[in-house]
Image (spheres, helix red, strand yellow):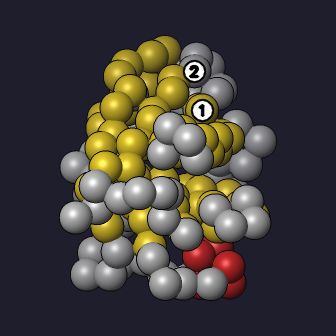
Amino acid sequence: GLELIESGGGSVQAGGSLHVSCYVSGYSYVPVCMGWFRRAPGKEREKLATIFTKTLSTYYHDSVKGRFALSLDNAKKTLDLQMNSLKPEDSAMYYCSALTGVDNTYCLSGVWTDAYGYWGRGTQVTVSS
């Protein structure tokens, strides 16, 4: 079945950049909807950015607009997240997720839950001040 494998992340000082990547395994093509989320200790999971892969429409959370950017590679079946101007409050576990059978509106605006969709195991991002 479909699996999402994250890589990248790590530690950086405030103002620096990091890159995380999500590889789609066990599927012939990228799912129709993919995204990146994060969860910091003691906080709710936060939807950072999503992309409807048929049209390349995207959503970015206000907290990362202008700093984070998605990059989709259909041939490699990867969705990357480039993170610039990082802040200590960006520190969290970052998760890749994918949905199938949804439309553009749900992909960008809908609520993603653990029970619906596919989730990677996460990769840690730590930003020091």
Give x and y (percent) for residue 53: 64, 62
Q: Which residue is mark 2?
A: 17
Asked where in the image residue 97 lies, by quadrant, the reply is bottom left
Vertical comparison of 124 with 27: above or below: above
What residue is at 58 percent from the left and 47 percent from the top? 74
Location of the N terminus (image quadrant): bottom left
What residue is at 28 percent from the left and 61 percent from the top? 2
Specify whether residue 20 is in view: yes
Give x and y (percent) for residue 98: 43, 65
Amino acid type, callout 1:
Gln
Under tag 1, what secondary structure?
A: strand
Judge depth for marks 1 and 2 and give the one in front.
1
Task: Give the side of residue 119 with respect to residue 14, left or right.
Answer: left
Mark 1 touches mark 2? (CB < 8 Å)? yes
Work out whether mark 1 precedes mark 2 in sequence or the reverse, and give the earlier one. 2
Return the residue found at the far front: 28
What residue is at 48 percent from the left and 65 percent from the top? 31
What residue is at 37 percent from the left and 19 percent from the top? 11
Task: Give the side of residue 9 with respect to residue 16, left or right.
Answer: left
Amino acid type, callout 2:
Ser
